[in-house]
Amino acid sequence: MQNAKQAVMEVLRQLPDDATLEEIQHRIYLISKTRKGREDTARGRAYLNTEAKQRLDRWLES
């Protein structure tokens, strides 16, 4: 896995030269959240879709 600086440099290489700061920020945000999700899943801090739906249904009923 790349370190954070390498990931940002790769984002900058992939985006067009006329990318806005907001587009760059959004792409970096997506990478950050994807990494966090993968880390959480690897550490067992995630729910299967069925489990998440059950939890949401219970929450909505209360």
Image (cartoon, rainbow, N blue to C red):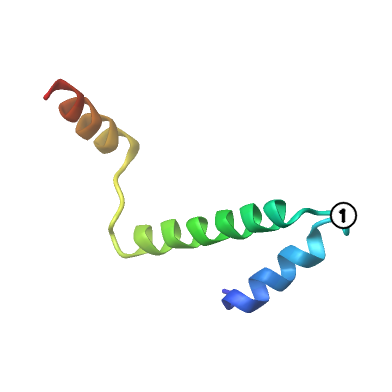
Question: Residue 57 placed where, x, y %?
Answer: 21, 25
| x 25%, y 37%: residue | 51
* Residue 44 appears left or right of 62: right
* Residue 54 appears left or right of 7: left
Farthest residue, direction front: 21
Farthest residue, direction right: 17
Q: Quadrant of the C terminus?
A: top left
Quadrant hosting residue 11: bottom right
Q: Is residue 51 visible?
A: yes
Q: Is residue 2 visible?
A: no
Farthest residue, direction left: 62
Residue under pointer 1? 18
* Residue 20 appears left or right of 36: right
On screen, 10 above or below 52?
A: below
| x 31%, y 65%: residue | 43
Question: Residue 41 placed where, x, y %?
Answer: 36, 57
Question: Residue 22 placed where, x, y %?
Answer: 68, 52
* Front residue of 45 and 60: 60
On screen, 51 above or below 14?
A: above
| x 29%, y 45%: residue | 47
* Front residue of 51 and 11: 11
Quadrant hosting residue 10: bottom right
Quadrant hosting residue 55: top left
Q: Secondary structure at mark 1?
A: loop
Label 1 amino acid? Asp
Within-10-Å neighbours for mark 1: few <14, some 14–19, many 20+? few
